[in-house]
Image (cartoon, rainbow, N blue to C red):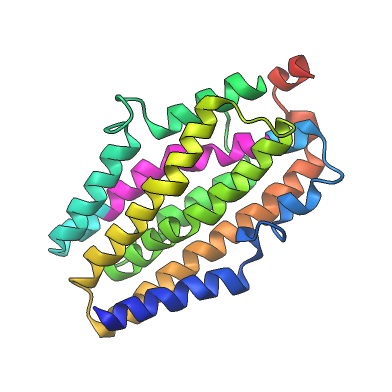
Amino acid sequence: GMEFNHLTKQLNQLLAQDYVAFSITENPVVQMLSQASFAQIAYVMQQYSIFPKELVGFTELARRKALGAGWNGVAQELQENIDEEMGSTTGGISHYTLLADGLEEGLGVAVKNTMPSVATSKLLRTVLSLFDRQVDYVLGATYAIEATSIPELTLIVKLVEWLHEGAIPKDLQYFFSKHLDEWEIEHEAGLRTSVAAYIQPEEFGEFAAGFRAMIDAMQVWWQELAQEAISSEVVLSTAIAQHH
């Protein structure tokens, strides 16, 4: 257990030091804010919203891997996370729906029927390929999603505040504060503790490789989203045009 906790600490340090996408000041979209238009940042939010929508499916793939390997405690932990994402603690309303409704109502921007862009499609394909690997690698990638969720949501809050000129609607405020102060902290700790009970030291390398592959893919996605936002105002949804 101790050695595995040491590994996850190192991976979290790697994330904080080497990955600008998860930095509240260095993220490529945050870097655009001083010159960005409402439409450009709304575009990023539309694309971002696709990831939480797909997350349940990815977690289910990881759950099946864990079950197949006999890592039943991990499978149980992931099932609880899926249930929560699907609304077990939010009156049956999924987290994705809470986010999408909040963004649509608050910003007047259509979110729910957003088609994945080139960058987002590439991310989803990459994640699917990572989740096709062996159990230790897949759980490293899954752990990376949990480890990045707090810095990433902190970024999203910053972008939403920018779009709202500071005043976040109550529904979104609730969504973000529950994730940041409660849900994500529990998910990260729960996954780390459950994996520690099964993983062997000789599997640490694969776990770390899965972790790095996932954060590499997410970093590239943020960089490419920033590029798309700069160059693709023409394809933005008409909802934005009506809003501004």
Query: Which image quarter: residue 206?
Result: bottom left
Q: Height in image: 27 above or below 241?
A: below
Q: Height in image: 123 above or below 130?
A: above
Q: Quadrant of the C terminus?
A: top right
Residue lying furthest top: 242
Q: Dominant secondary structure of the magenta stretch?
A: helix
Give the x, y percent position of residue 176: 50, 39
Image side of residue 184 versus residue 217, left or right: left
Asked if the stretch drawn in magenta spans residue 47, the answer is: yes
Q: Which residues are magenta?
A: 43-62
Q: Quadrant of the N terminus?
A: bottom left
Asked if the stretch drawn in magenta spans residue 92, the answer is: no
Image side of residue 189 versus residue 98, left or right: left
Q: Nearer the viewer, residue 34 or 122?
A: 34
Q: Nearer the viewer, residue 182 or 76?
A: 182
Residue in view at x 64 percent, y 59 percent: 21
Any part of residue 232 in sight: yes
Give the x, y percent position of residue 219: 60, 60
Q: Height in image: 9 above or below 62?
A: below
Q: Height in image: 136 above or below 25?
A: below
Give the x, y percent position of residue 119: 63, 48
Any part of residue 110 in sight: no
Q: Nearer the viewer, residue 125 or 74?
A: 74
Residue in view at x 23 percent, y 58 percent: 65
Give the x, y percent position of residue 107: 66, 24
Residue in view at x 60 percent, y 42 percent: 157
Image side of residue 37 versus residue 162, left or right: right
Residue lying furthest right: 35
Residue in view at x 58 percent, y 45 percent: 120
